[in-house]
Image (cartoon, grey):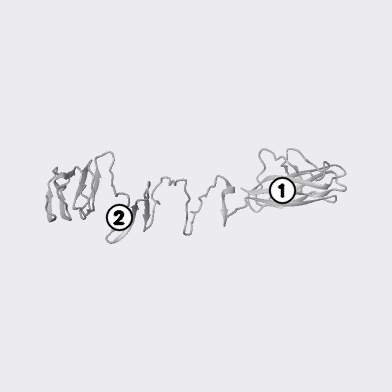
């Protein structure tokens, strides 16, 4: 087939095949060849002529038996399958694979060096899939509004990596309590949702006169301040070394502070002369 301008129809019956070597002769500028294949007709071998601009139009079913196709392949309502272990489409170093609906490009795969770049003009819809969508380790940019369906959770392994405008989104609220000799047991935090204590640190420039102590409690219902569940393994000493930060040790499973529950300070000893402050951390859970 050395003719450089062919326009004809070639029909292959069921079970028939054509060898690619028959299409590889000469330089073909425009191969306007239509193949009407039977249900099991096939093209075997490789078609590799680099000058084929319009390769073939297939009007039925094309099994490719381990060969390769170079050029443009039009499939009108048929299927493209291969019996080979790997089906390779080689577009060279600068080529691309484009999927069109008529003249409209649906998506394309372009050369990107060692990896290809997939461009999609329409929607990428996985809504009917129960599978998992994975990405690589590179950066991901969401250029539009992003919505998470009701009842679903966006999980971030390390909360400190969650940033908005380059700033870390705070995960913990801090409540400040002034330490004074006149301080009584009192509520310092009322929950509007579920919270948990994360820390408590105290420092004083004037210590309590005698055995001053501080405990944190979670109070529920009509419990009075300081009468609920203790959250520290031991009381914080308010009569120790001045100007030294003292950290409380939380119990192994801090109580969930539900909406309407409170965090209170429970004081003990003689607080005469006490002057300082405590910082209490609570986080939403």
* Marker disc for residue 194: none
Relative to 142, 254 lies left or right: right
The crowding category of the residue bearing disc 1, from other C-alpha atoms within 10 Å (few below 14, some 14 to 19, many at least 20), is many
Q: How many numbered circles does the render carry? A: 2
* Callout 2 secondary element: strand
- Please provide percent x and percent y for residue 213: 81, 42
- Please provide percent x and percent y for residue 91: 29, 50
Residue annotated with mark 2: 99
Query: Residue drawn 15% across and 54% down?
Result: 33
Alpha carbons under labels 2 and 1: distance apart = 59 Å
Relative to 146, 122 lies left or right: left
Relative to 164, 30 lies left or right: left
Q: Nearer the viewer, residue 76 or 99?
A: 99
The answer to whether marks 2 and 1 mark residues whose Cβ atoms lie closer than 8 Å is: no
The crowding category of the residue bearing disc 2, from other C-alpha atoms within 10 Å (few below 14, some 14 to 19, many at least 20), is some
Between label 2 and label 1, give the one nearer the viewer.
2
- The tag earlier along the polypeptide, 2 or 1, is 2
Q: Nearer the viewer, residue 78 or 150?
A: 78
* Callout 1 secondary element: strand
- Please provide percent x and percent y for residue 109: 34, 52
Residue located farthest toward the bottom when viewing the structure as drawn = 103
Query: Residue drawn 72% across and 39% down?
Result: 249
Q: Nearer the viewer, residue 273 or 196?
A: 273
34, above or below 229, in the image? below
Relative to 8, 117 lies left or right: right
- Please provide percent x and percent y for residue 144: 47, 59
Residue annotated with mark 1: 280
């Amino acid at each position: 087939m050395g003719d450089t301008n062919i326009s004809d129809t070639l029909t292959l019956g069921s079970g028939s095949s054509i060898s690619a070597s028959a299409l590889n002769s000469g330089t073909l500028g425009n191969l306007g060849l239509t193949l009407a294949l039977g249900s099991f007709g096939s093209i075997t071998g490789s078609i590799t002529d680099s000058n084929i601009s319009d390769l073939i139009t297939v009007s039925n079913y094309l099994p490719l038996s381990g060969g390769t196709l170079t050029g443009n392949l039009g499939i009108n309502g048929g299927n493209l399958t291969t019996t080979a272990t790997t089906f390779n489409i080689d577009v060279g170093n600068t080529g691309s694979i484009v999927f069109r609906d008529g003249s409209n490009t649906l998506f394309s795969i372009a050369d990107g060096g060692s990896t290809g770049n997939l461009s999609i003009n329409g929607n990428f819809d996985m809504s009917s899939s129960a599978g998992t969508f994975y990405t690589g380790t590179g950066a991901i940019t969401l250029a539009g509004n992003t919505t998470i369906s009701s009842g679903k959770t966006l999980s971030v392994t390390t909360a400190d990596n969650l940033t908005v405008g380059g700033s870390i989104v705070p995960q913990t609220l801090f409540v400040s309590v002034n330490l004074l000799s006149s301080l009584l047991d009192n509520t310092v935090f009322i929950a509007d949702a579920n919270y948990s204590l994360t820390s408590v640190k105290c420092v004083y420039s004037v210590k309590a006169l005698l055995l001053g102590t501080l405990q944190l409690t979670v109070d529920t219902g009509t419990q009075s301040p300081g009468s609920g569940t203790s959250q520290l393994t031991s009381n914080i000493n308010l009569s120790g070394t001045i100007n030294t930060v003292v950290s409380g040790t939380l119990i192994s499973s801090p109580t969930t502070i539900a909406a309407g529950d409170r965090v209170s300070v429970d004081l003990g000893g003689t607080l005469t002369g006490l002057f300082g402050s405590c910082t209490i951390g609570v986080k939403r859970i």
